[in-house]
Image (cartoon, grey):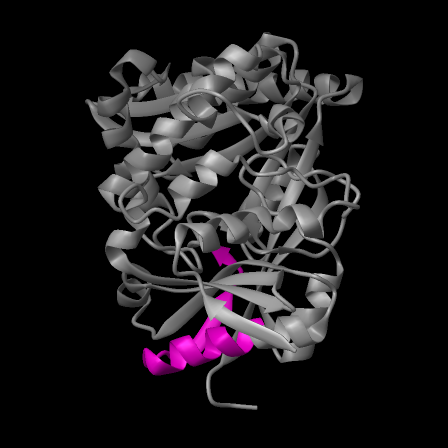
Amino acid sequence: MVRVRPVESSKDLMRFIKFPWKVYKDWPAWVPPIISEEKKRFNPEKNPFYEHAKVQLFIAERDGEVVGRISAHIDYNYNEFHDEKTGLWGFFETINDFEVAKALFDAVIEFHEKEGMEQVLGPASFSTNDVTGMLMNAYDLPPVVMMPYNPPYYVDLVEKYGFRKAKDLLAYLIKIDDEFLKFADRLQKRLKPLAERALERGYTIRNIVIKNWKEEVEKIIVIYNEAWEKNWGFVPWTRKEFFHIAEDLKQIAIPELAKMVERDGEPVAFGLIIPDVNVVIKKLNGRIVGPGLFAALPYLLNIKKISRTRLITLGIRKGYRKSGVDSLLYYEMMKSALDLGYIKECEVSWLLEDNYLVIRAAEFMRGKHYKTYRLFVKPIGLE
């Protein structure tokens, strides 16, 4: 018999955090999380998400052994922004057993029903600003940094319970091979005059200045919350949340791959490519000594030797689009990435399946759609 109960103690939390090692012992592509970072993620005093959310973690047990886990949580900022009553679930892990999965989802539904929610959406761990979606293919490939991974049977369990597709999120892979370099050379020749024209109009572009990190992040928040405002599932970052994640990214950011476009002192556009530090995290198997994962990474490796990267964000504020800013940003980011000389792959992720403009841009850049992630939804109270 399966028993699902809330996580109520530090001992429960450690069982919750360590359970994935049981699930993925035979899945070599999995990248174990860092245990100390997971403890901070689930600490309301250290994770600013809790300031606008209600969170309950659950573990499923059979004969005293943990066989599954899940979170039920409400992001009040999300619901206010979208004028919805949507409950969320995430951090879903289970053995391949529908009885376990059903018990976990029953607990999620019961939690959200009591809170007056009308539907449940997931997986989102914790929000659409965090690790989002369920992997639908390419299970032999490891996830890049800040992207999810799961076994294929999760999809079957979720669909059997009655969840349906809400939205697919796509990942494109650009390989920096000889053919791409030839293409890039031709493209740069086309983009250069357009970029120069933008400069003549008063736009400037520069690398992010790490030593001025606080001031830089204040500008990036403005760009991000405005550029993505109309996207499906978007929820504005709070200032505390943005600084929380930015402090981690600061440790692995490469200034040449973090570009800011400005005009008359106003932030206009921003692009960021980060190294796929999962290459190193995988080897740590959840353990690290020191002040924290991202603070320790620079001492564990030369960041600039990681040949796989992720284009994590590229956005332009409303009112500045179709002004040449896009050409300026594309040109300078491509030039800097190629000039570094060691980058061999770049994942562009994630892209909404119906954001055709961005998808066409990824395909134009010789990107190949190679991974799909899905968000699932289920109304509450309907069979």
Q: Is residue 2 visible?
A: yes
What percent of the width, then of the height, locates residue 315? 41, 38
Q: Is residue 347 above or below residue 55?
A: above
Magenta stretch: give its range: 104-125
How many marks the image carries: the answer is 0
- Taking the spot 57% from the left edge, 67% from the top edge, the residue there is 60
Spot occupied by residue 291 in the image (x, y as percentages of width and height): 39, 22
Residue drawn at x 55%, y 14% is: 300
Q: What percent of the width, then of the height, locates residue 190? A: 58, 21
Asked if 135 appears above or below 119 in the picture, the reply is above
Q: Nearer the viewer, residue 164 or 227?
A: 164
Q: Along the line of sight, which residue is nearer the eye, 55 or 360?
A: 55
Residue in view at x 57 percent, y 10 percent: 302
Quadrant in which residue 364 is drawn? top right
Quadrant in which the N terminus is drawn: bottom right
| Location of the C terminus (image quadrant) | bottom right
**117 over 274 or under it: above or below:** below
Specify whether residue 117 is painted magenta: yes
Q: Residue at x 70, y 65 (%)?
A: 155
Q: Residue 35: percent from the left, percent from the top?
A: 51, 37
Q: In screen coordinates, is 165 left or right of 78? A: right
The image quadrant of residue 335 is top right
Describe residue 19's horizontal placement relative to residue 75 as left or right: right
